[in-house]
Amino acid sequence: MVKAAVLGAAGGIGQPLSLLLKASPLIDELALYDVVNTPGVAADLSHIASPAVTTGYLPKDDGLQKTLEGCDIVVIPAGLPRKPGMTRDELFTKNAGIVAALITGVAKWCPKAYVLVISNPVNSTVPIAAEVLKAHNVFDARKLFGVTTLDVVRASTFTAELTGEKDPRKLTIPVVGGHSGDTIVPLLSLATPSVSIPDDKIEALIKRIQFGGDEVVKAKDGAGSATLSMAYAGYRFAEAVLKADKGETGIVEPSFVYLPGVPGGDEILKAVGGLEYFAVPIELGPGGVVKATNPLGKASDAEKKLLEVAIAGLKGNISKGVEFAQASSAKL
Ligand code: NAD
Ligand code: LMR
């Protein structure tokens, strides 16, 4: 029996992500939580002929507890999205508290679940989640993931547009660092199969991958940020975690993880100047991260310069999250 929960399930990401989870044969029970509209979303999804029994909860009547009890995997897209001109960091004021409160629920009611954090700014909300779980003595770094799969998906899509590859899924491009602007570092030199990008196009390609989120925010013109592509990416990552949990081997996906707590993390921590959180390709298995792999030494010289910029940016984002959680832990 696999029980999945979506927190923020009535939102722009939450609804299509819940649809994909409902359609998945990997899930037996799907619990949807939001501050609004989840009874309607759950009723609608429950008519789909798939195994997952679907329920919707609101905060009243212990809704968060009912959502999370017995959960194996929790996906969190709750919180505000950007409007044009905003950075992800500007979402911190509202979203930090939302994520801290929801993770407190995870710590109390499903401390052994896989936790997939989508809410921005991911570079800070994942450290917040880790600190809250640590404060409740239930932190297992192998099970906490900042979802950076959309960066990986964009890297394949935009690169395939340039190389003429008709199926972008055939391109695997490691994307490392964090999830905002120049903390996102695509390692195009390590693409498999290898790709040849003309010199006059590579800089623009890297920028497009790093700032792909802005492209959608601008096009939506005030109506939010990426939702459908994020639901696809979030489902892809959740499916990878669940398949690995069932024993499928060889599953590797990049994710933003707490390096000191995952196998292979210490070597990467040294390579990134002591940063405790970094997105790298991780091998998944039963129990979560089996090994964090270190592609950084093989990066090109130009990519190593991008990595330096990413590390400098991430430092502040991470400590902001840690400090917020430590200051508020007494209240959680
Ligand atoms: P949205 O506004 O459409 O939906 C967010 C939902 O969260 C709403 O339904 C809202 O009611 C709900 N919510 C707010 N407070 C809550 C709480 N305390 N408990 C439960 N639910 C709560 O926004 P969206 O477009 O779905 O984006 C959600 C988040 O995902 C944003 O922070 C956005 O920046 C982020 N995002 C991350 C990535 C990524 O790659 N990691 C990609 C896209 C968007
Ligand atoms: C994205 O990369 O699309 C998300 O982080 C949403 C955003 O704010 O751009």
Image (tube, rainbow, N blue to C red):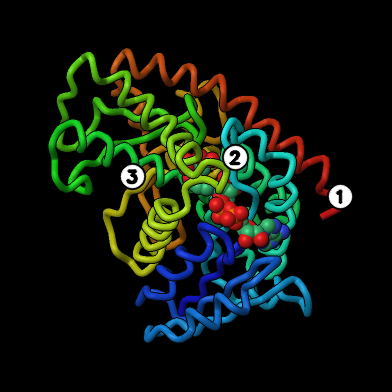
Q: Which residue is mark 2?
A: 83
Residue at 56%, 19% in the rendered image: 312
User: Quick check: can you spot residue 117?
Assistant: no
Task: For label 1, count other residues whose C-alpha is less than 10 Å away and answer few (under 14), some (14-19) or many (20+).
Answer: few
Measured along the vertical axis of the image, is residue 202 above or below residue 100?
above
Residue located at (30% from left, 54% from top): 251
Hey, what amino acid is under mark 3? Answer: Val
Q: Does label 2 or label 3 sit earlier along the sequence?
A: 2
Kindly indicate whether the residue at mark 3 contacts the one at mark 2 (C-beta within 8 angstroms): no
**What is the x, y in percent for residue 82?**
59, 41
Mark-to-mark CA distance, 3 and 1: 39 Å
* Amino acid type assigned to the residue bearing label 1 in the image: Ala
Label 2 sits on what residue type? Lys
Where is mark 1, residue-wise? 330
| Kind of element beneath mark 2 | loop
Which residue appears farthest toward the right when viewing the image?
330
The x, y position of residue 114, in whole percent, is 52, 61
Q: Nearer the viewer, residue 263 or 223?
A: 223
Disc 3 versus disc 1: nearer the observer: 3
Image-based side of 51 in relation to 42, left or right:
left
Whether 278 is drawn above or below 10: the answer is above
The C terminus: image quadrant: bottom right
Please identify, in this view, whether the residue under mark 2 or under mark 3 is nearer the observer: 2
Question: Which of the two labelled residues, at mark 3 and mark 1, occupies the earlier sequence position?
Answer: 3
